[in-house]
Amino acid sequence: MISEAAWERAQKVRGLILDVDGVLTDNRIYYGSEGEVLRAFSVRDGLGLVLLRDAGYRLGIVSGRASSTVRARARELGMDPVLLDRSDKAAALEEVLAAWKLQPEEVAAMGDDILDGSLLAKVGLSMAPSDAREELLARVDFVAPAGGGRGAVREACELLLRAGGHWEEILRRHHLDEESPWKNRPEITG
């Protein structure tokens, strides 16, 4: 659920900043045999970000950890800037705003732990996955029903696309609207 006031703020959003661990991932880190850090990313979250990007939204990452896997995923999704190894996320927000030439009220952010509080407190729309820290869940504008790395980002993207008036066009483009050729498709029995 989202309040009416938060929905109105969502309609003004033009950019999305994401934390990584616990938001784009399920908060687990895997180590390969050579000590390399591996992470699993949700393909559905990725599609949500691509749809958001294609609708004209800016996408960025602010994370407390440095990681080549995060840089690779961000590059694949067209996310910029990617600010890693940043414990002062409020200061990182200022860098993002300057790069995007946006005001704080035009930006949404999703985080999952107490280090994200300074960022979430300063954006127009604050969001968290359902498995975020209790301290954040009590304060954010939108709690995604899914957990981090398991669809929370996709739900945030869909919320922004709906608020921005883009969702119906996306459904139409992919033949999932009321005029879909599937609407009158005969039942398959067997």
Image (cartoon, rainbow, N blue to C red):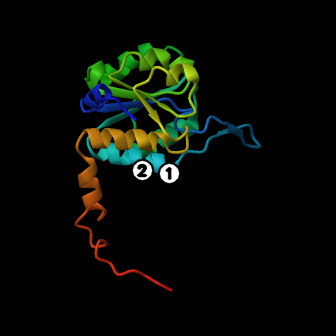
The percent coordinates of residue 118 (x first, y second) are 46, 14
**Is 187 left, or right, of 98 in this rendering?**
right
Residue 86 appears in the figure: no
In this figure, what is the number of numbered marks? Answer: 2
Q: Residue at x 37, y 32 (%)?
A: 2
Q: Residue at x 60, y 39 (%)?
A: 26
As drawn, 133 above or below 91: below
Q: Amino acid at mark 1?
A: Val
Q: Which mark is residue 43?
A: 1
Q: Nearer the viewer, residue 185 or 62?
A: 185
Q: Residue at x 44, y 18 (%)?
A: 119
**Is 124 left, or right, of 111 in this rendering?**
left
As drawn, 50 above or below 13: below
The percent coordinates of residue 182 (x first, y second) are 31, 72
Task: For marks 1 and 2, give the CA distance.
Answer: 6 Å
State the SS at label 1: helix
As drawn, 176 above or below 52: below
Residue 36 in which image quadrant: top right
**Is 123 left, or right, of 61 in this rendering?**
left
State the SS at label 2: helix
Farthest residue toward the right?
33
Q: Amino acid at mark 2?
A: Leu
Whether pointer 1 and pointer 2 mark residues with C-beta atoms closer than 8 Å, the reply is: yes
Q: Residue at x 37, y 47 (%)?
A: 50
Say which quadrant the N terminus sits in: top left
Q: Which mark is residue 188?
A: none
Q: Nearer the viewer, residue 9 or 47?
A: 9
Q: Residues within 10 Å of mark 2 (few under 14, many from 20)?
A: some
Q: Which mark is residue 47?
A: 2
The percent coordinates of residue 94 (x first, y second) are 36, 16
